Image (cartoon, helix red, strand yellow):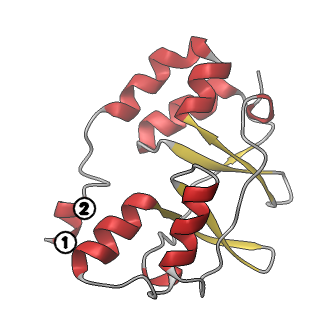
Amino acid sequence: MKIREVMTRDTKLAAPDDTLRHAAKLMNEYDCGILPVAEGDRLVGMITDRDIAVRCVAEGKGPNTKVRDAMTEEVKYCFEDENVSHVCENMSEIQVRRLPVMDRNKRLVGIVSLGDLASKAPATAKALRGIAQPSMQHNQRSAAA
């Protein structure tokens, strides 16, 4: 099974100069916890609800703070024609719960989440268990120390 068969295609985007308020409203409206951040047709980052809470609100930054001040610039992604099992292994290794999905021209075509994989490719559960394990790589406390 290929990632294109399980991913979510209707992806909303934020821009680096959008405010956190705008990004949070989009997340609320579309019931998602992550938004790809694009500048023109280029993916330049990702912002999550956790980024907003931990990197901004906890640090005293307000709703008019720019998305660029909270987003993660290093974007991990997968390709739509990759096998689900391979992507699950990669997600487990790098401990992420969602990945943007690109076509071979590196254009964003969707997002794949643990929920997508669990509901549409249940045989991947074993590979996904590693994602739920705590990691120091994404620990906000260790990053701030």
User: Is 48 left or right of 105, judged from the image as shown?
Assistant: left
Q: Horizontal and vertical percent for residue 138? A: 32, 54
Q: Horizontal and vertical percent for residue 61? A: 32, 85
Specify the quadrant of the image occupied by residue 84. top right
Q: Is residue 84 above or below residue 21?
A: above
Front one among 81 and 12? 12
Residue of label 2:
140
Front one among 73 and 112? 112
Q: Horizontal and vertical percent for residue 116? A: 63, 31
Residue occupying image coordinates x 60% and y 82%: 16
Label at residue 128: none
Front one among 11 and 97? 11
CB under 8 Å between callouts 1 and 2? yes
Estimate the spatial distance between the alpha carbons at disc 1 and disc 2, rounded to whole Å. Answer: 6 Å
Q: Residue furthest left?
A: 145
Amino acid on which disc 1 is placed: Ala
Q: Circle 1 — which element? A: helix
Q: Is residue 57 above or below residue 135?
A: below
Residue of label 1:
144
Q: Circle 2 — which element? A: helix
Query: Taking the image as drawn, is residue 80 in sight?
Result: yes
Q: Horizontal and vertical percent for residue 33? A: 51, 53
Query: Taking the image as drawn, is residue 46 in sight?
Result: no
